[in-house]
Amino acid sequence: MSEPSNVAKYGLICLAVSGCIALEHIGRLKNLPIKPSIPFQFMHDKLKILFSWIGEHFAKISSFLSLIDLTELKQTIYDIVSPICGIVVSPLYTVEGYINALVNYKPRWQVYLGSISICAIVTIGLYYFNKGKYFDGLKGYVSKMISN
């Protein structure tokens, strides 16, 4: 049995992400209480509290150890980290713009057709990028997951 290729793994990740986006969209349309974003929001809130607590205690400890004034440290770190995070997160604004355009025009079946088309284009692109080995790797990856 062949090892799954990286392209097959990325293809499964793309399908999972597009499935989460579709489920989130359906959940918002139907006002369902269960959406894929809820665990991520919960994790984000908990990590925010944790890192804020760590930062406060680090500031207290380091202010005793040094004579550096740390009142502007938070803004300095924010000024450094914010553009880096913006670069990483900026491709997500493409998805946000796409979803906002769909919401403003309120299409029904076009949303699902567009999502399926994007998945098909990504899959075909990965297939040709890997010279036809994508589906072999995907078959090996799925069979390995089932056998375990």
Image (spheres, helix red, strand yellow):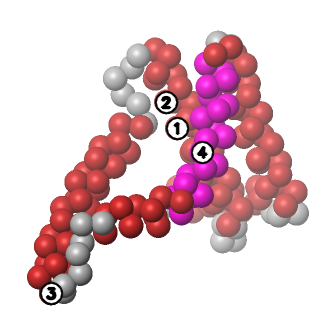
| Front disc: 3 or 1 | 3
| Residue type for callout 1 | Cys
In the rendered image, residue 123, in percent from the top left (x then y), is placed at 77, 48
Left or right of 34? Residue 2 is right
Residue drawn at 72 percent across, 32 percent down: 116
Measured Cα–Cα span from mark 4 to mark 2: 15 Å
Asked if 109 appears above or below 74 in the picture, the reply is: above
In the rendered image, residue 77, in percent from the top left (x then y), is placed at 38, 67
Determine which residue is flagged by label 2: 24
Measured Cα–Cα span from mark 2 to mark 1: 6 Å
Determine crowd level at label 4: few under 14, some 14-19, many 20+ residues with C-alpha closer than 10 A: few
Measured Cα–Cα span from mark 4 to mark 3: 41 Å
Circle count = 4
Find residue 20 and name its label. Answer: 1
| Residue type for callout 4 | Leu
| Kind of element beneath mark 1 | helix
Find residue 92 and name its label. Answer: 4
Determine crowd level at label 1: few under 14, some 14-19, many 20+ residues with C-alpha closer than 10 A: some
In reply to whether residue 94 is colored magenta, the answer given is yes
Residue drawn at 41 percent across, 16 percent down: 31
| Front disc: 3 or 2 | 3
Q: Identify the magenta region.
A: 84-103
In terms of sequence position, does the residue under pointer 3 or pointer 2 come before the other? 2
Front residue (pair 95, 53) = 53
Measured Cα–Cα span from mark 3 to mark 2: 48 Å
